[in-house]
Amino acid sequence: MRFVADLHIHSKYSRACSRDCDLEHLTWWARRKGISLVGTGDFTHPAWYDHLTENLVEAGPGLFRLREDLDREIDRTLPPSLAAAPVRFMLSVEISTIYKRDGHTRKVHHLVYMPDLESAARFNARMARIGNIGSDGRPILGLDSRDLLETTLECGGYLVPAHVWTPWFAVLGSKSGFDAVADCYADLAGHVFAVETGLSSDPDMNRRVSSLDGYRLVSNSDAHSPPALGREATVFDTDLDYYAVRRALETGEGFGGTLEFFPEEGKYHVDGHRKCGVRMEPEETLAHNGICPVCAKPLTVGVLSRVEELADRDVPAPAGGFTSLVPLPEVVGEILGVGPKSKKVLAQVDKLTAALGPELVILRDVPVDDIAAHSPLLAEAVARLRRGEVVRDSGYDGEYGVIRVFEPGELTRRAASLALFDAEPAAPAEPARAPRKAPAQSAAEAPPPVAAPAPVGGSLLDGLDPEQRAAAAVEGGPLLIIAGPGTGKTRTLTHRIADLVTSRGVPASSCLAITFTRRAAEEMAERLAALAPEHAAGLTIATFHSLGVLVLREHHAAVGLSASFGVADPDRQLEVARTLVADGKAAKALVEARDERYLAALREQDLVDFDDLISLPLELLEGSPELVAAYRDRWRWVSVDEYQDVDEQQYRLLRLLAPPDGDLTAIGDPDQAIYRFRGADVGFFLRFREDFPTARVVHLTRNYRSSAAVVRGALEVIAPSSLVPGRELTPMVDHGDAAIGVHHAASEAAEAAFVARTVEQVLGGASFHAFDSGRVSSDGTRGLGFSDFAVLYRTDRQSRALVEALTRSGLPFQKRSHDRLAGRPGVARIAHEVGHAPGGTVLERVRAVAGDDHTAYELLKPLAAECGADVERFRAELALGVEVDTWDPRADRISLLTLHASKGLEFPVVFVVGCEDGLLPMRWPGDDDADAVDEERRLLFVGMTRAQRHLFLSHTTARPRSPFLAPLESFEQVGEARPRRRRKGTQLSLL
Ligand code: ATP
Ligand code: MG
C-alpha cells in the first residue's frame, strides 16, 4: 500500500517540546494529517520508553499501534472522514553526538530505529553507559558518530543521519560537520543508506552533490508538537512493516519520494545573522567574505551556501519524485490574515478535514473543484501550490522563512469578489521580521589552539625546548628539576626516560618512574608508549602504592602474606576491625591507631591496607641491605615526578632505592605542594641538594600550557607565600586575550547552573534548544569536546550541586574520585576490561578479569567508583547477578574533580567553584595555622594552572569571597561582562 510516514518526531520528554506529545495526541494528529506510520521518537528516555511499553501493542512486523481501548477513544473524537485509518509506530530516537575528531568539534544528530522493544532496551542500556539519557528525550552524548552507528548495528537497528545540512548539528553542517557522510561514519559508512534532507533543503538541491547519490533522501517533520506532524514526510509503497520500510530505504524499491517544505521556508536556508537583521544569498555572503556587516563576526552560513560549497554538479540529477507543500493551516492562515495556530484557522481546518479528508490529502489529491465548494480562495491557493507558484521569503540563521501563495495586496482585492470561508475579509498576513540587536560578545571565546611545534630531526629530545633538553640530556647522577606548572616537567621526564632507553643504551628494565596518582601514572605510561613504543612494556611506571604492591608480591613470605594477598579498602578495614570490637567508633579508632590487634587481624585474613603498602616494604628494605642492593641493581635509573609531595616514609623508601650518587631524577614544584595534611613535607624537596651533594639543579621557566592571563593571574595568587624565590614563568602559547572570568552567584545552585550554561556557551550550543532560543554564541567552539572541561572544587560535597545542574542540562559528566585508587594498581585497566567484557553478569565479568572471587570482591569498591556507579547498587547488582552500568570508555565527558585530584592534569577550560573564605581556604574550627592557609593557597594555584584557554573562578554569597582572589582585583578589565546574560544576583566579570 502507498502511505505517508513521518519518522522523526519528539515526545513531551524532549526539551522545548509540547506537553501534548504523547501517543494519544500523536495518533489523533496522524489521522488528521493522513500519516500512517509515525516514529515514536525518544525511545531512549526511560519515562517515554515506559509509556511506549504500556500503551503500544505489536502490529505487523517490527511496528506498533496504540492500544485498542485508547484507539477507540480517539476515533470517537474524529469525524468519520478521519477515523479508523491505520496509524502505526516505529521505534525511533534522535541522538545528538558531540565529540572531537581531527581537532574539530563535531556535532551530529542521528536518527536511530529499532525493530522491537528488547532491541531498544539493549540499545538504551548501552547508551546509559555513555551519558545521561534520562534528562532529555534527545540525549546529548559525547560519543563518536561512528561508534554510535556501531552500537546501533550491534543492537539490530539502523541509523539515518538527521537533517544533514543544519549548520550546527548535522553530518554535512557548515559549522561542525564533515564534507561527506562517509567521512563521518568512517569504516562503517557502508551501513548508512538514507539521509534526512531537513526542512531547509529539497532533493534537487541534494542531488547537486554527487557523494549523496548512493543515499535515499528522506524527509520528516522533526515535530516538537503534534500539529507539526507531517510538515515534511516520506512516501512508501510497501506493507506496513519495519523490515519492508528498511528494505525500501536500502534498495529504493517501494520508496515513493518525499513531501517537502519549500526549502526557503526552512530556518537555515540562506545566510545571515538573525540578531543583526542581516540576511544574504550565497553570492552576497561571498562578496562580504562571510562576515556580518553589522557585527563583523562570521555569518551563519545556511544550507544553500553549504550545498553550493559541496556541489559538484550544476544541473541536478533527476531526483526521486517529491512534492513541495505548505502546511494547510499556513495556507488557511494566509487567507484569513491570522497566524496558522489561531483558533480561527483551527476551526476552518476542522471543517475542511471533516468534509474532504486528511490535510495532506486536501493539499495533494482532492480535486480543486471540490475544494472550491468550500472556499474558492483556498481552491485557488491549492492549485497554485500544486503548480509551485508561490512567493518565497527565505529563512536564515534559525528564523523560519515564509512561503505565501498570494501576492501582497492580492487577497484584499480578491476578497471583495470571493468569499473566504464565510469569514470576514482580512488583511493578508504580512510576515513580520523585526531586526534584532547585535548579540553581546560571548565571554567564552578563544582563539584557535596553537599547535605544539613539531619535532624536527631525529632525536626524541628535539621535542623539547633548550632548557628542557638540557635537563633531559643530563647524563647520570642526581638531578633536581625545579619548575612551575605547565613548564613541561612531566614532558621532560618522559622524554628523558624515552631517550635513555632508545638512544643511550639504558635497558628499559632498569628504569623506574614513580608518581603519585593512578591517573598520573597512566598518563605517563601513555606518553612513554607513544615516545618509545618498543621499550614501554619493559619500563616500571608506578605510584608509590603500586610500587609497594610490587615489592610485597615479590617478598610476601617475609612479612607473612601469601602470594595472592589482598588490599583492604576503608570499608574492609572497618570490617576487619569490627571483628575485634563491635562498636563502629572504636573500630575506626583501632584502624587509625594502626593497633597491633587490628594489624594482626588483617594479616590473618591475608590482607594489607594502604598504609601497609609503604610501611611494609620500607621495613623490609631497612632490615635487609641485600634487598636494597638488589633493588638498586635492578632499577639504576629512578625518576620521581611531583617530588614536592613526598612524605617521610616515601622519602625514606626513595633514599633506599637510590644511593646518594645514584641516577635519580626528582622533578617538581614546591608551590604545588598540597599534601601536607597527609604528611607530605616540601622540606624533602628543599633539601635535595644536601641529600644528594653531587646533584645538578635545573630550572624550567617557560609555560606551555596556559594563556597569558592564566599565568599572570596564578602568579599573583601564589606570590604572597611562594616557596620559589624569584619565581619566573613566561607564557609561551598564544591563546589570544582569553581572560580569567570571575563569577559571583547567588547560591551554590546558581553557581552550578552557571557552569552548565557556560559549557553550553563554549561548545556553541550543546543542544538545539540552547541555540534556537539564542542562549549561546554562534561561534568560538574551537574544536572542543566535553572531555576538555573540568570543574574543580575543594571538597567532594560541593560536587552535588554540579551533578544536579549538569544532569538537568543533559550534559555528560564523570566524577573522578580522589586518588583512593592510587594503591590499586590496574583497577582502571580492570574497570575498562569489565566495561568492555561482552555481556554477562557483573560477577562473571569481574571474575573473568580479576581471576578469583576474593580478588573480585576486593576490587568491588574501586571498580564501582571507577565506573561511576554507587557502591551499594553495585554490590546489590553483583548479588543479583545483573548487568552493571559501567561507563563506556569511548564516551567524552566533563570531569568533576577535587582540586587535589587535579594535580598534574590539564584542560582547555577549567572552573574552580567555591572560591570562598572558609572553603578555599578551608578552615577547621580552632585551626588558624598559617602553614595550613598557605597550603590552601597553593591548592588554588594548582587548580588555576590546570587551565589552558579559559579559567573561571566562581563564588557564592554563602560565604565571603576568598581572600586569595584579592590580587586579581587589580587586574585590568580585558573583556566586557555579558550584559544580556546577567541575572538577578548573578554577574560575571572578566579579569
Ligand atoms: P604540572 O606542574 O602541572 O605538572 P608540568 O610542568 O608537568 O606541569 P607538562 O604537563 O609536562 O607540565 O606540560 C604542560 C603542557 O605543555 C603539556 O601539554 C605539554 O605537552 C606542553 N609542553 C611542554 N613542553 C613543551 C614544548 N617544549 N613544546 C611544546 N609543548 C610543550
Ligand atoms: Mg606534571
Image: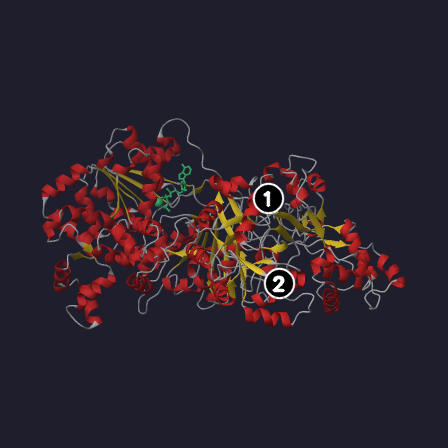
In the rendered image, is residue 409 in sight? no
- Residue 252: assigned label: 1
Query: Badge 2 local density, few (<14 within 10 Å), some, or many (20+)?
Result: many
Q: Is residue 801 above or below residue 406?
A: below
- Ligand 1 occupies quarter: top left
Q: Amino acid at mark 1?
A: Gly
Residue at screen point 12% across, 60% down: 604
Question: Where residue 236 sits in the image (x, y, percent)?
Answer: 62, 51
Given this view, does label 1 or label 2 mark the residue nearer the observer?
1
User: In this orientation, which residue lies closer to the viewer: 647 or 770?
Assistant: 770
Residue at screen point 79% across, 49% down: 389
Q: Amino acid at mark 2?
A: Ser
Residue at screen point 81% across, 55% down: 406
Which quadrant of the structure image shows residue 926?
Answer: bottom left
Q: Does label 1 point to a residue whose CB lies under 8 Å from ligand 1? A: no
Q: In the visual, does 566 lie left or right of 231?
A: left
In the rendered image, is residue 888 in sight? yes
Q: How many marks?
A: 2
Q: Which residue is mark 2?
A: 225
Q: Residue furthest top?
A: 457
Residue at screen point 29% across, 28% down: 503
Mark 2 lies on a secondary structure that is: loop
Q: Earlier in the sequence, mark 1 or mark 2?
A: 2
Q: Is residue 56 above or below residue 270?
A: below
Marks 1 and 2, how far apart at CA: 30 Å
Query: Badge 1 local density, few (<14 within 10 Å), some, or many (20+)?
Result: some
Question: Where residue 582 sits in the image (x, y, percent)?
Answer: 18, 72
